Image (cartoon, helix red, strand yellow):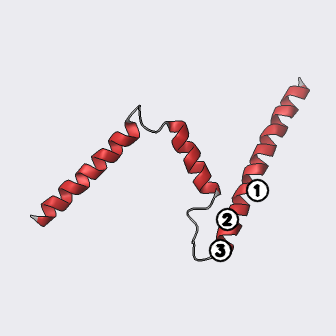
């Protein structure tokens, strides 16, 4: 009986999560993506017990983001000036 209740609870939790993610009135795709990028750059997945790892991850991800943005700007300028 307890296994059945656990299974029912898990099923309801999964269905609520799917409904929440697909609900048009819920959080938009852009908001979820923005939150995901913010969490990624802020290193929320890094080991919180090691501050060096957290800050190293943050610095590396920020530098990578800036490098990618810089390369995109350079590419746009290169293509527009070449025409």
Q: How many marks?
A: 3
Is residue 53 positioned above or below 31 on the image? below
Toward the right, the furthest residue is: 81
Name the side, left or right, on which 38 lies relative to 7: right
Q: Secondary structure at mark 2?
A: helix
Is residue 20 positioned above or below 54 on the image? above
Name the side, left or right, on which 19 lies relative to 27: left
Is residue 41 positioned above or below 75 on the image? below
Q: Nearer the viewer, mark 2 or mark 3?
A: 3
Q: Earlier in the sequence, mark 2 or mark 1?
A: 2
Q: Nearer the viewer, mark 1 or mark 3?
A: 3
* Quadrant hosting residue 74: top right
Residue 79 position, x and y percent, is: 84, 30
For label 3, the residue is 51
Residue 59 position, x and y percent, is: 73, 62
Distance between the alpha carbons at the discs numbered 2 and 3:
10 Å
* Quadrant hosting residue 43: bottom right
Distance between the alpha carbons at the discs numbered 2 and 1:
10 Å
For label 1, the residue is 63
For label 2, the residue is 57
Residue 44 position, x and y percent, is: 57, 62
Q: Earlier in the sequence, mark 1 or mark 3?
A: 3
**Disc 2 + disc 1, Cβ < 8 Å:** no
């Amino acid at each position: 009986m307890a296994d059945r209740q656990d299974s029912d609870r898990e099923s309801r939790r999964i269905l609520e999560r799917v409904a929440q993610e697909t609900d048009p009135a819920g959080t938009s795709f852009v908001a979820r993506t923005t939150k995901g990028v913010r969490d990624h750059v802020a290193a929320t997945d890094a080991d919180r017990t090691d501050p060096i790892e957290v800050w190293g991850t943050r610095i590396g991800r920020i530098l990578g983001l800036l490098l990618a943005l810089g390369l995109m700007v350079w590419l746009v300028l290169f293509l527009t000036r070449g025409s």
